[in-house]
Image: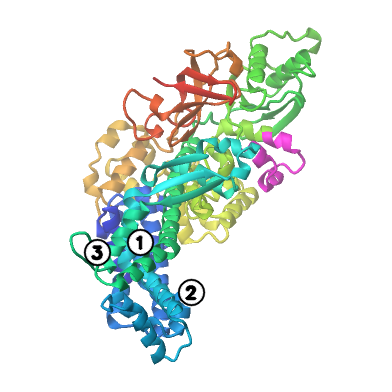
């Protein structure tokens, strides 16, 4: 019954068909992964994409948590013997977390409050007398109540205690809380002030924009809010959120206090006491509680936005254009410590490594040039990958000079056995963010137990040129350098989102079953660390896989795991060409029937466009297989195993610009987008300091988000509009 309710609630919230949501929830419960559902179960979901399925999954998890919370609330109220049929009915019908907590608040166990003390003193009847505002003499009423309960309290203390009860009643009233929430939603101002003792400190300088800052909360962007909250956590800023207090209190009083006359005079002396209680309850209880709510909810929204942008940046980075299986030289550039150079074969295996010192202070340029030439010839290097960190520009220029023949190799050093590469290697500069993290990781130690961190880092730089996805999955996404405030957002939510993104990218591209590392395999749908290791171990013992069906022989890889993973694993050169495609084994019989009906083989269908065009897919529709799946099959037969990623392009910075001092306003320069945020995009123009293209400088039209205009690692032409040497800030424009 509850599942039906969940499907209905989720469908309404996400504007989806209830049947599609119910089917998706059933598939998720069966253990199907999001990539598998979106790719191979379109008939059941109505063609929902990964984003929609992920949203359904997240909503379902939240509803389950809320259901458990409702059980706790019901048990607590029942144990207090305060449950009523109406209250039970309200709780059963409630599927809003805030509303549920409002219902629960009067019954919620709490620390001993002033109101509880007053109730223990028998002052609740007096509080109700004051609240009704019919008594003309509050002191007489207090004295009468004190006599009735034989209390030794003074009249003043009794009235004060009664006011404490009223203050708590007002603060816990659902109507009062919702009214104040509405005020916060409409008009709350977030204010940031510097802690005076920290104002002149070095660590405070980066928060100078927020030393005296205020703006409507509803207009506060996620990056500004996260910046302020970080400053607050570091003890530099004080943050508050507040509506118009006077107006908010006035609205509350109009609900509880009776007025008379055109001037709004209080009807009775009790009204003054109730007004005082409301003032106290608002300041001491109600406003802090609602402010805490809005601080949490605004932070949650900011987190979600930051995580969304981070995830999209990560997706673009992981799906970056691969060079493919080429013999690559990886270079981790440096000045004093030299450049660490590695040579890799087409499968990414380390063949050779050495350090060269072409830059100051060592300046062994000729020796370094000869070493590079020797390595290129000996290992038949086809491409060179240079990290974009310190000394990157200088190293790239040096390598290009070597390739251009500016450093001649003495004849005495030439070896007859050394063969020249058939063509000059291409030179690429790649992001080295995260390479140092990888180099010190357990994964790197397991891969290269006998090499130091410098070698491992250079290998990572070389491999990410060959296949960014395969290499970057080994690195904690937070360390890749494409997010903002990644350490300030909700960490479990961030990890969940980034893991989903990695899984989505890996399965969108597909994985070569015979070359994929254990770490790449673990992100394949239906697999995990254990099964990924078992696949690699099986491969080592039995040689390369020749068919997907062999996966069934891998220890612990049962029918369920096989169903989930098979369609995302590729076997180039397999006897059955479908094993190198995204066609799922469960659909092989359909393709074979298509081939049989047209008197040809499956290979003929793939190679012959005319035969494919002659197929009427409607003839192959069954109760389980519909047009969506059949259409996907035909697309795959057209280009089986096609890599969806773009082709890699060479890039070169302006040769006349190497430092920030070389920049002049108005310059038009080539650049690479390195990071995308809500407020703009950072672009590397080759001066060791990324410039910012603010969202207002991205197009001659209003845009909702920088992602609408640029993507990560895109090659762009930018105009320099301002250079702030003091703060090392560069402002750029795409206009």
Q: Which residues are magenta?
A: 434-457
Tags 1 and 3 touching, CB below 8 Å:
no
Q: Residue at x 48, y 58 (%)?
A: 561
- The disc, 1 or 3, on the residue closer to the chain's N-terminal end is 1
Q: Which residue is mark 1?
A: 25
**Neighbourhood count class around disc 3 (C-alpha, 10 Å): few under 14, some 14–19, many 20 upward:** few
Residue occupied by mark 3? 265
Residue 404 % position (x, y): 64, 10
Question: Which residue is at 40% across, 49% downward?
Answer: 584
Instruction: Name the quarter where the N terminus is drawn.
Output: bottom left
Select label 1 or label 3 by which is in front.
3
Residue 153, position in %: x, y?
47, 84
29 w.r.t. 244: above or below = below
Residue 113's tag is 2
Disc 3 and disc 2 in contact, CB within 8 angstroms: no
User: Residue 486 location in percent, x, y?
Assistant: 54, 45
Q: Residues within 10 Å of mark 1 (few under 14, many from 20)?
A: many
Reading the chain from its start, which is encountered first: label 3 or label 2?
2
- Judge left or right: residue 168 versus residue 529: left
Outermost residue to the right: 412
- Relative to the observer, which residue lies in front, 316 or 77? 77
> For the point 49% across and 39% down, which residue is it?
212
Left or right placement of residue 13 versus residue 465 in this view: left
Image point (31%, 32%), residue name: 609
Spatial separation of the CA atoms under disc 1 and disc 3: 59 Å
What color scheme is it? rainbow
Q: Quadrant of the C terminus?
A: top left
Query: Circle 1 — which element?
Result: helix
State the CA–CA distance, disc 2 to disc 1.
44 Å
Nearer to the camera, 482 or 163: 163
């Amino acid at each position: 019954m509850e599942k039906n309710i969940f499907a209905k609630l989720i469908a309404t919230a996400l504007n989806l068909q209830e049947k599609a949501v119910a089917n998706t929830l059933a598939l998720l419960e069966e253990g199907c992964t999001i990539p598998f559902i979106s790719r191979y179960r379109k008939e059941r979901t109505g063609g929902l994409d990964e984003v929609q399925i992920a949203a359904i999954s997240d909503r379902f998890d939240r509803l389950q948590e809320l259901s458990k919370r409702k059980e706790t609330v019901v048990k607590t109220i029942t144990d207090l013997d305060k449950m009523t049929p109406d209250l039970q009915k309200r709780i059963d019908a409630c599927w809003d977390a805030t509303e549920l907590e409002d219902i629960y608040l009067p019954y919620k166990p709490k620390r001993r409050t002033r109101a509880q003390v007053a109730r223990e003193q028998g002052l609740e009847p007096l509080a109700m007398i004051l609240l009704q505002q019919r008594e003309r003499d509050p002191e007489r009423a207090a004295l009468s109540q004190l006599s009735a309960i034989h209390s030794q309290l003074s009249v003043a203390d009794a009235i004060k205690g009664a006011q404490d009860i009223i203050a708590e009643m007002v603060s816990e009233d659902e109507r009062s809380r919702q009214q104040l929430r509405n005020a916060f939603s409409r008009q709350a101002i977030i204010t940031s002030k510097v802690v005076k003792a920290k104002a002149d400190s070095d660590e405070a300088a980066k928060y100078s924009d927020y030393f005296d800052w205020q703006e409507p909360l509803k207009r506060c962007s996620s990056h500004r809010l996260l910046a302020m909250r970080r400053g607050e956590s570091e003890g530099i800023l004080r943050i508050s959120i507040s509506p118009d207090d006077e107006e908010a209190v006035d609205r509350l009083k109009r609900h509880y206090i009776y007025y008379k006359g055109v001037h709004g005079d209080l009807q009775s002396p009790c009204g003054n006491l109730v007004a005082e209680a409301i003032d106290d309850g608002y300041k001491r209880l109600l406003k802090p509680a609602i402010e805490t709510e809005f601080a949490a909810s605004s932070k949650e929204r900011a987190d979600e936005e930051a995580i969304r942008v981070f995830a999209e940046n990560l997706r673009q980075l992981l799906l970056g254009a691969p060079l493919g299986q080429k013999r690559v030289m990886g270079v981790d550039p440096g000045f004093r410590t030299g450049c660490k150079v590695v040579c890799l074969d087409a499968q990414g295996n380390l063949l050779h490594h050495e350090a060269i010192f072409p830059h100051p202070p060592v300046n062994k340029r000729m020796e370094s040039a000869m070493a590079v030439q020797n390595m290129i010839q000996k290992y038949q290097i086809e491409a060179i990958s240079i990290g974009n960190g310190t000394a990157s520009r200088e190293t790239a220029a040096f390598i290009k000079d070597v390739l251009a023949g500016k450093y001649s190799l003495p004849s005495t050093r030439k070896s007859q056995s050394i063969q020249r590469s058939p063509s000059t290697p291409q030179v690429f500069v790649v992001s080295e963010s995260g390479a140092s993290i990888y180099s010190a990781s357990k994964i790197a130690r397991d891969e290269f137990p006998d090499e130091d961190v410098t070698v491992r880092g250079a290998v990572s730089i070389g491999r990410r040129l060959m296949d960014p996805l395969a290499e970057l999955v080994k690195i904690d996404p937070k360390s890749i350098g494409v997010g903002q405030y990644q350490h300030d957002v909700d960490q479990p939510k961030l990890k969940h989102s980034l893991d989903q993104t990695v899984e989505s990218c890996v399965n969108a591209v597909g994985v070569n079953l015979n070359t994929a590392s254990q770490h790449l395999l673990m992100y394949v749908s239906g697999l995990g660390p254990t099964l990924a290791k078992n696949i690699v171990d099986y491969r080592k013992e039995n040689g390369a896989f020749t068919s997907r069906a062999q996966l069934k022989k891998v220890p612990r890889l049962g029918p369920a795991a096989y169903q989930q993973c098979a369609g995302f694993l590729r076997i180039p050169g397999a006897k059955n060409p479908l094993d190198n495609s995204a066609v799922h084994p469960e659909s092989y019989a359909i393709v074979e029937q298509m081939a049989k009906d047209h008197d040809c083989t499956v290979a003929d269908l793939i190679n012959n466009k005319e035969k494919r065009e002659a197929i009427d897919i409607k003839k192959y529709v069954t109760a389980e297989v519909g047009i969506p799946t059949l259409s996907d099959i035909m697309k795959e037969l057209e280009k089986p195993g096609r890599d969806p990623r773009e082709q890699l392009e060479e890039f070169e910075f302006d040769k006349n610009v190497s430092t920030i001092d070389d920049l002049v306003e108005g310059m038009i320069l080539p650049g690479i987008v390195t990071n995308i945020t809500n407020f703009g995009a950072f672009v590397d123009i080759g001066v060791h300091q990324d410039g910012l293209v603010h969202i207002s400088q991205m197009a001659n039209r209003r845009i909702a988000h920088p992602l609408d205009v640029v993507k990560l690692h895109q090659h762009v032409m930018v105009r320099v509009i301002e250079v702030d040497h003091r703060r090392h800030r560069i402002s750029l424009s795409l206009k």
